């Protein structure tokens, strides 16, 4: 019996996060896993009745740890609980790293690009052919080890997560197909070849007797064939015996490398199927038939692909395990730099420079990029130059690497003989990027008229590599170099000798899009690799970098493209507001250029900006660009919690130690961003939402607002931490006489009212609109606000929403509402915990205050008894109230009767919202009687969700037939039925019917109803019938009347 599992995590804790239904599903899926007979008996006998603790004990007792972990990952994944699966995978990654630190893998060479490998892992005889393991396998292992430079720890870590790579895994338990995906150069191919090496080295021969290695690039060169011909391409003498091999499919491993290299029209992989081994089909159909399981349904398959090709692959593979290769971790990069540089201090300096550029540091996860970076920076140091400017942007680094390989000697002249090869290479790079070709064969080169002699200078310098798996094939050292050269294509001027080849040039560049197409979102969705080309193109628009290209290669570079970059990237001609995502990318493009003139030109055209600051990189890009803004009028700002150091108190201790320098940099960037308030004299609108500030960053912002002569008029602060930010910001605003609108929302805003009172008391205060949401205050503070309102002569709209004002607080505000010099016109008290007790003070205010025209009491339990008291004010002849909102106030038919008395007399009331009150048939009848009165001035009536049925439609129809003022009627969320709506329609057909908007609950699957409403629209052209699709609980139509 296997020893009990020893896990590095608590399986019980994971199971306890499952609901009861999820736990039952977990048990069902676990029992469905193929297991040994004795284990199956245990499962059936004990699992069904086990709770989470017992289930964890059963599993740990009867299974080995590796099997438990991998099986749990699969089961949690099948349940769509990837959060739990990921936690186990994280533990396995950490264990793998510890194991690698303790037992370093042997240094092996780089596996050759074998076109198609068929090997047998045991001494077998098929049809008279004898393959001896020692003789044949050792031969291939020798080839592999001879070419292999080293197998990185990256591939070792990922390999330990692939079930088919561990012989201890029980057959059939895990998905037969594993998809290994990740960016270019992260080691996917290296890992697939390492798996093949393990197979030849007897590490996997107990699991798989046979293994096939297929590269998709090679498939592009093959015509139609049979499955047998495909897998025996290099060993045709074995064709007759392969059927016996294929019969043991469960012992076969198929590795398909580079799925993204497969060149087929869109949708071609699913247009046909191959079901027989001897059926002749296009090679891509045979491949897709392998993937969907039609051929070799029991075989195990390992596929490698770039992430961007995943969409097409997911259509073909079922029940697959998708693993993302991470590339170099930070410690891997450090080890690589230390190996590359002779001097440790130089290595650490170079690594720090790379870490200062987040984009460059992310790219260095690819081993090839690490080599490029180290080569470039080491060369700079050897020449006595400061390497820091090379790491400022990705363009500067890759361009410096490229030019560094061909830099003329000091005092030397440009190498004019490189001008032609550079143009050829840029054409090849651009063509490949647009057609998503990364490995170029003879046919690709021939179609562009490229000769090997054109490529030789770049082959000699390592910019290009010649493929070993495909004779006459070439690829760039890394995708980033291809993208840089593709961008260079757009700025190279054609030489005079090229003018005679216009026809050839046109045919060679047919597939290459122009600048407008390069930046179109549609093209980038189809080909994400164009995004980095766009970044590089901005980077190359810098005059100094253009000169570096000219001096190195003797070519001519044109910067006329700069205006096109701004036109098509910024969409400035369309004058559309930028989204946060568009803004982030555009600022990155401008930063990549490092061209002050270009940035000034671009920023001068922006009148509004939406900034989402997530990290140091966002801060750096924004600071670089915003200091050149002069015409901004509106700013939206969102700062995430991780940006400022004070918000990261709970982070890891090591991370805290590494933050001080970063925090100083971030505060410097933040100071430059804040300078926009003084630089933009037309900036009138600021909204900061869902943002987190530290003490220093909040102080910097408030100081900038306080000290500058900014002309802010509208300010919205929503969900900001810390809570005292509201108070400090309001003090900073108190001296600005331009401020007219202020909204404060979220985080309880403790002690905000005193600073607001400072604003209201200021003799030059022009504040007209004040909105407080979720504001908490003491009775003393409410009293202070009331006194401030008495002296203020500008505020016309006060909105208190979701605030614990309560009856006591309103009583304290009562004096300001009754004050003869009160300028308040609109008062919204929504969800302020008011009851009927507040109505006496409100009624008194309605009688005395002749300016108050809008009153909202939504979401307060006023009730019918409260309406009786409020009626005293509403019915007063001098009451000037025009808009009354009583949404969800517990009003019934009795309250409606009182409101009907107000409506029927000659009053100023024109808008009434009674939504979500149970007024019923009797209440509606009272309102309908009032609507028929000639003195009724009501223009808008909202009755959403008021329990109105078809039995009330006759009263409504009669009222609509006689009313001369109502233009809007909301009957949403009321079940009126076909006959009820038909009555309304008949009434609305009368001549001169004033109603313009009717909102109904419409069943879109009721054809007679739809036909009735369509006929209604034809007979009354001015009437708009709206379906009740929105939820007014989120945004009521009547709220519009409380916005200035």
Image (tube, rainbow, N blue to C red):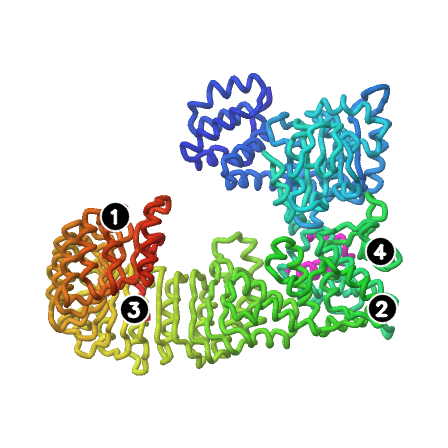
| Residue 780 is at least partly visible in this image | no
| Residue 314 is at least partly visible in this image | yes
- In the image, residue 340 above or below residue 157: below
Q: Residues within 10 Å of mark 2 (few under 14, many from 20)?
A: few
Snapshot quadrant of residue 852: bottom left
User: Would you name the residue on which mark 1 appears?
Assistant: 976
**What is the magenta range?**
333-355
Report, in whole angstroms, how far the alpha carbon at label 3 lies from the one at label 4: 71 Å
Looking at this view, is 547 or 14 the one in front?
547
| Image point (35%, 63%), residue name | 745
Judged from the image, the secondary structure of the residue bearing numbered disc 2 is helix
User: Would you name the residue on which mark 2 appears?
Assistant: 500
Judged from the image, the secondary structure of the residue bearing numbered disc 3 is helix
Report, in whole angstroms, how far the alpha carbon at label 3 lies from the one at label 1: 47 Å
Q: Residues within 10 Å of mark 4 (few under 14, many from 20)?
A: some
| Image point (62%, 36%), residue name | 317
Q: Which mark is residue 1008?
A: none
- Which is closer to the viewer, label 3 or label 1? 1
Label whose residue precedes the other's in the sequence (2 or 4): 4
x, y (%) of residue 214?
A: 75, 37
Report, in whole angstroms, how far the alpha carbon at label 2 lies from the one at label 1: 78 Å
Report, in whole angstroms, how far the alpha carbon at label 2 lies from the one at label 3: 78 Å
Judged from the image, the secondary structure of the residue bearing numbered disc 1 is loop
């Amino acid at each position: 019996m296997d020893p009990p599992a020893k896990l590095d995590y608590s399986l019980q804790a994971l199971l306890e996060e499952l609901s009861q239904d999820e736990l039952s599903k977990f048990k069902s899926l676990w029992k469905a896993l193929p297991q040994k007979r004795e284990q199956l008996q245990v499962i059936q006998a004990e699992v069904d009745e086990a709770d989470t603790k017992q289930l964890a004990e059963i599993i740990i007792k009867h299974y080995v740890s590796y099997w438990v972990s991998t099986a749990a990952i699969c089961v949690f994944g099948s349940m769509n609980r990837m959060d739990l699966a990921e936690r186990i995978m994280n533990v396995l990654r950490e264990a793998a790293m510890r194991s690698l630190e303790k037992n370093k893998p042997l240094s092996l060479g780089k596996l050759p690009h074998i076109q198609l490998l068929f090997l047998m892992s045991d001494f077998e005889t098929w049809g008279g052919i004898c393959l001896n393991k020692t003789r044949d396998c050792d031969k291939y292992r020798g080839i592999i080890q001879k070419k292999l430079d080293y197998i990185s720890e990256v591939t070792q870590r990922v390999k330990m997560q692939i079930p088919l790579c561990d012989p201890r895994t029980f057959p059939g338990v895990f998905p037969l197909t594993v998809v290994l995906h990740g960016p270019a150069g992260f080691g996917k191919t290296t890992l697939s070849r390492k798996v093949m090496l393990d197979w030849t080295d007897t590490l996997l021969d107990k699991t798989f007797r046979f293994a096939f290695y297929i590269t998709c690039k090679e498939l592009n060169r093959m015509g139609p064939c049979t499955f047998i011909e495909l897998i025996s391409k290099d060993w045709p003498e074995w064709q007759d015996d392969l059927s016996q091999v294929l019969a043991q499919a469960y012992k076969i491993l198929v590795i398909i490398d580079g799925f993204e290299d497969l060149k087929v029209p869109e949708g071609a992989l699913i247009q046909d199927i191959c079901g027989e081994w001897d059926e002749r089909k296009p090679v891509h159909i045979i491949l897709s038939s392998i993937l969907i399981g039609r051929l070799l349904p029991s075989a195990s398959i390992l596929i490698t692909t770039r992430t961007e090709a995943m969409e097409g692959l997911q259509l073909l593979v079922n029940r697959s395990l998708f693993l993302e290769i991470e590339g170099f971790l930070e410690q891997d990069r450090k080890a690589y730099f230390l190996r590359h540089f002779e001097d440790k201090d130089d290595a650490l300096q170079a690594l720090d420079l790379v870490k200062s550029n987040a984009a460059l540091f992310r790219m260095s996860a690819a081993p090839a990029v690490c080599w490029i970076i180290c080569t470039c920076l080491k060369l700079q140091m050897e020449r006595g130059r400061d390497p820091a400017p090379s790491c400022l942007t990705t363009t500067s680094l890759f361009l410096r690497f490229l030019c560094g390989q061909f830099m003329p000697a000091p005092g030397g002249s440009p190498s004019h003989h490189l001008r032609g090869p550079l143009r050829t290479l840029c054409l090849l790079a651009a063509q490949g990027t647009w057609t998503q070709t990364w490995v170029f064969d003879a046919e690709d080169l021939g179609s562009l008229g490229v000769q090997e002699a054109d490529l030789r200078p770049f082959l000699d310098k390592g910019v290009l590599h010649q493929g070993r798996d495909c004779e006459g094939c070439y690829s760039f050292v890394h995708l980033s170099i291809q993208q840089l050269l593709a961008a260079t294509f757009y700025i190279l001027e054609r030489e005079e000798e090229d003018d005679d080849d216009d026809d050839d040039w046109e045919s060679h560049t047919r597939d290459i899009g122009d600048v407008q197409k390069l930046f179109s979102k549609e093209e980038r969705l189809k080909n994400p690799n164009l995004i980095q080309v766009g970044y590089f193109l901005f980077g190359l628009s810098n005059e100094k970098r253009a000169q570096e290209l000219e001096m190195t290669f003797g070519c001519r570079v044109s910067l006329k493209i700069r205006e096109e970059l701004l036109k098509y990237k910024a969409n400035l001609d369309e004058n559309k507001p930028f989204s946060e995502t568009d803004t982030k990318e555009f600022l990155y493009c401008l930063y990549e250029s490092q061209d002050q003139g270009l940035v000034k030109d671009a920023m001068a055209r922006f009148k509004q900006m939406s900034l989402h600051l997530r990290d140091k990189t966002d801060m750096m890009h924004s600071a670089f660009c915003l200091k050149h803004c002069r015409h901004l009028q509106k700013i939206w700002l969102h700062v995430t919690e991780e940006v400022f150091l004070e918000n990261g108190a709970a982070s890891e201790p090591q991370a805290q130690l590494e933050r001080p320098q970063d925090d100083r940099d971030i505060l410097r960037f933040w100071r430059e961003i804040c300078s926009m308030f003084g630089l933009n004299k037309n900036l009138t609108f600021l909204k900061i939402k869902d943002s987190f500030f530290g003490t220093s960053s909040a102080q910097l912002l408030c100081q900038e607002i306080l000290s500058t002569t900014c002309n802010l008029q509208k300010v919205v602060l929503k969900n900001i931490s810390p809570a005292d930010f509201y108070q400090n910001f309001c003090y900073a605003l108190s001296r600005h006489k331009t401020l007219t609108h202020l909204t404060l929302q979220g985080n309880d805003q403790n002690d905000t009212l005193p600073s607001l009172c400072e604003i209201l008391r200021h003799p030059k205060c022009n504040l007209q609109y004040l909105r407080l949401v979720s504001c908490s205050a003491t009775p003393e503070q409410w009293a202070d606000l009331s006194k401030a309102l008495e002296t203020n002569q500008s505020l016309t709209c006060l909105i208190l929403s979701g605030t614990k004002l309560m009856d006591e607080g309103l009583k304290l505000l009562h004096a300001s509402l009754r004050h003869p010099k009160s300028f308040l016109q609109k008062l919204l008290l929504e969800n302020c915990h008011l009851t009927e007790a507040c109505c006496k003070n409100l009624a008194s205010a309605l009688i005395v205050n002749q300016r108050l025209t809008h009153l909202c009491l939504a979401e307060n339990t006023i009730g019918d008894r409260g309406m009786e008291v409020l009626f005293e004010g509403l019915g007063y002849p001098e009451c000037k109230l025009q808009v009354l909102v009583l949404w969800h106030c517990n009003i019934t038919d009795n309250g409606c009767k009182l409101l009907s008395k107000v409506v029927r007399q000659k009053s100023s009331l024109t808008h009434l919202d009674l939504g979500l009150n149970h007024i019923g048939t009797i209440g509606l009848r009272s309102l309908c009687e009032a609507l028929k009165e000639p003195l009724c001035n009501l223009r808008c009536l909202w009755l959403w969700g008021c329990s109105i049925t078809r039995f009330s439609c006759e009263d409504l129809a009669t009222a609509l037939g006689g009313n001369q003022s109502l233009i809007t009627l909301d009957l949403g969320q009321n079940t009126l039925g076909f006959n009820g709506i038909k009555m309304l329609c008949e009434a609305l057909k009368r001549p001169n019917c004033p109603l313009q908007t009717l909102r109904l609950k419409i069943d879109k699957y009721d054809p007679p109803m739809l036909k009735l409403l369509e006929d209604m629209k034809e007979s009354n052209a001015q009437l708009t019938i709206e379906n009740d699709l929105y939820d007014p609980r989120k945004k009521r139509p009547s709220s519009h009347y409380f916005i200035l």
